[in-house]
Structures are given as structure tokens and as C-alpha cells.
Image (spheres, helix red, strand yellow):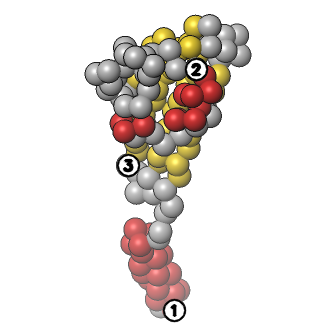
Amino acid sequence: MKAVVKTALVLATALTLGACSSWIYRIDVPQGNFLEQKDIDKLRVQMTKEQVRFVLGNPVAENAFDDDIWHYFYALKGGRGENFEKQLIASFKDDKLVDITGDFKKPDNFNTPLDK
């Protein structure tokens, strides 16, 4: 009889603790460059790499074989399982920005150089 009571008590404790696991705080894990559309709106064709770096920060990755392509990537793994990802690829030619692609809207005035 004591074995049955012990087994029931252990089982009840295990089930109770298992139910509490939803109360455990899980941290959000951000990785990469957090960019907002307002940052992207500052970009213009023919900006130098130095100017783009000033506006957006250092890229997460530069192409090892072609230093004219910069990758900006941001991922957030939420503690509760929700995930968020955004990317931006900046393309350069002769140290000047020529195009951007990715998950952001290209600014309407992107094709107007800063000096115009």
C-alpha cells in the first residue's frame, strides 16, 4: 500500500512541476543588425561604403569573394517560440552603392544621389 501512495505522490509531483514549465521565463535571443525602415530611407544611390556603414552599421557578412555585396540580417528567436527575421543586401560598384534588395521597401528617392 505504501508503494502505491509513494508512486501516486511522485506522479502527482511530476505532473504539477510539468505544468509549471509554462511559467519559466525564456529570454529572447536577437542576432544581427536591427534595422528599421527609417534607416533604409536614408540610403541613396552612389553613397560610399563608409556612408552606408555610418547609416546602417557594419554588415553581418561581407562576401568573401566579392567585397561589393554586404548582407545585413536580423533574427529574433522569441522565448515563447515566435520568430522574426529580416534581411537587406547592399550592392556596390567602385565603392558606390548601386542597389538594395531584401525585406525592406526601397526609398522612393533612392535613385537620387545625395549631392543632387
Three-letter residue code for mark 2: Thr
Rendered position, 6 above or below 92: below
Q: Residue at x 44, y 22 (%)?
A: 114
Q: Which residue is at the front of the view, 1 or 32? A: 32
Find the distance from the CA under tag 3 to the CA under tag 2. Answer: 36 Å
Residue 29 shows in the view = yes
Give the crowd class for mark 2: few <14, some 14-19, many >=20 residues within 10 Å. Answer: some
Q: Residue at x 41, y 44 (%)?
A: 83
> What percent of the width, then of the height, locates residue 36?
40, 40
Q: Which mark is residue 2?
A: 1
Can you identify the residue that label 3 sits on? 82
Give the crowd class for mark 3: few <14, some 14-19, many >=20 residues within 10 Å. Answer: few
> What percent of the width, then of the height, locates residue 77?
47, 48
> What percent of the width, then of the height, locates residue 18?
44, 71
Q: Nearer the viewer, mark 3 or mark 2?
A: 2
Tag 1, which secondary structure? helix
Furthest residue in direction right, as rendered: 64
Q: Image quadrant of residue 45?
A: top left
Three-letter residue code for mark 1: Lys
Find the distance from the CA under tag 1 to the CA under tag 3. Answer: 45 Å
Can you identify the residue that label 2 sits on? 48
Rendered position, 20 above or below 98: below
Closer to the N terminus: mark 1 or mark 2? 1
> What percent of the width, then of the height, locates residue 37?
36, 36
